[in-house]
Every structure is written in structure tokens, then in C-alpha cells.
Image (cartoon, coloured by chain):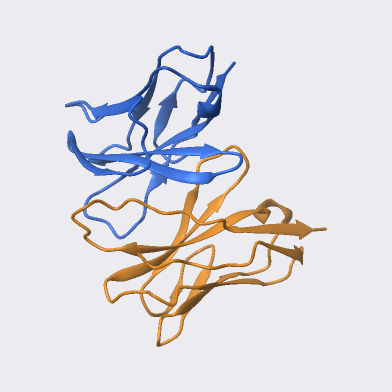
Amino acid sequence: LAKTTQPISMDSYEGQEVNITCSHNNIATNDYITWYQQFPSQGPRFIIQGYKTKVTNEVASLFIPADRKSSTLSLPRVSLSDTAVYYCLVVRANNNAGNMLTFGGGTRLMVKP
Amino acid sequence: DSGVTQTPKHLITATGQRVTLRCSPRSGDLSVYWYQQSLDQGLQFLIQYYNGEERAKGNILERFSAQQFPDLHSELNLSSLELGDSALYFCASSVEPLKGEQYFGPGTRLTVT
């Protein structure tokens, strides 16, 4: 599966929009881009998933350019409770070997008052 | 609340001992995954079961084993425990086939002394 690269950490302030970019240069045709959020001592929580262009749900947006070699998770108007680690993953659909997730280092987002 | 339950929440045991961690997936999910998260190694995939059968194996030690029962709950057995096995163990579940949306339980914190 494609290896992902994302910033180790980011700082922001309450009310700002935060954009976290992930690069996945070796993404394959069948791969989907998925983002998870993890708070300390809790299991990761699925945020959003996309294949191309733009996906939006109630908590975030995911922007994927045409070449799909990168993606950007956008969190609108962050609050202190958005302080967490955010993981970008590339997942292969219908993989007969199983849908195991390979988590990288993630981006540690710190939201300040 | 993801709908995935794990017991026990905390477990403290001595080196050389054997423990069993239990996971109940979300209602309707046929697939169960086990992950280990230690401080210095991030989140590592261990093993996946689908409807009672092993589907994929990750970095699981030979001292560790797992199974999924007919009622779909799963157990992870850790034996001959070592200090380095101290970690958070997460169970996740999903509907198969899926593009990567897994629901994680709250985890079991294992401390080996």
C-alpha cells in the first residue's frame, strides 16, 4: 500500500480553519484515502474517506486533486476539543487479504485558546 | 460510543503470565481487527478475523493468538508475557467488504510488571 507522509505537528487557535496535508505519491487505482482522529488513551475514530475531488461531512472536508498524490483534511473553525492526533491512511478497497490499516506517525494538532 | 466493547479496561499482570482480552463488535459487523499501541511504536495491526475465520495477519508474535467465536465476539490471548508487551490493545470492527471505515473500541491497557 502507498506510504503516507504528513507533518508531525501543527498549532492553531480556536475558531480558525485547519488544513492538514498528506502526501501519498504511490497511491494505486483501487486505493481510498481515509482520515482518523485519536485522542489520548482512546481508539482512533473514523473522520472521513474519499477517492477523488471533494468530500464533505458534518465534521470535515477532504480535498483530493486530480492526480490523487496528496490530500488535504480541512477542519472548519476548530475548538480546543479538536486537539488530537490525525492519521492519514491509504486503504485498498475489497482487498481479499483483509482491510488492515497501516497507521503512520500522524499529525499532532494542538488548538490553543 | 463506537458500539465496540472491550473487557477488561485495565489489566496488570506479571511477566511469564497469560491473559485473555475480549472484544464484542458492533451489531452486524462480521469483521474484527486487533491492534497494539505502545508508546514508542504507534498503532500496529495484529490480526483480522471475518465471520470466524482468520483473514489477515500483521505483526503478531507467536506468543499471541486470537479467535472469533460463532457469536462474532473475539478474544486475543497473550502468553509468556514480557515487559515489552505493556501497551494499549484495541479491537475494531467493520462490515465487510469495506474501504477502511473501522470502528474502534475503548481499548484494554495491559501493564506487565
Residue A67 on image: x %, y %: 40, 86
Can you name the residue that lies furthest to the right here? A113
**What's the residue at 52%, 39% (across, down)?**
B37
Figure check: A91 above or below B33: below
Viewer-proximal residue, A53 or A15? A53
Residue B18 on image: x %, y %: 41, 14
**What's the residue at 53%, 12% (across, down)?**
B14
Camera sees residue B74: no
Is the C terminus of chain A in the top left, top right, bottom left or bottom right quadrant? bottom right
Chain corresponding to blue in the figure: B
**What's the residue at 66%, 55% (across, down)?**
A82
Left or right relative to B104: residue A15: right
Figure check: B35 above or below A34: above
**What's the residue at 28%, 37% (across, down)?**
B27
Camera sees residue A79: yes
Chain corresponding to orange in the figure: A
Can you name the residue that lies furthest to the bottom here? A66
Residue A66 on image: x %, y %: 40, 88
Figure check: B59 above or below A51: above
Is the N terminus of chain A in the top left, top right, bottom left or bottom right quadrant? bottom left
Residue B81 on image: x %, y %: 46, 19
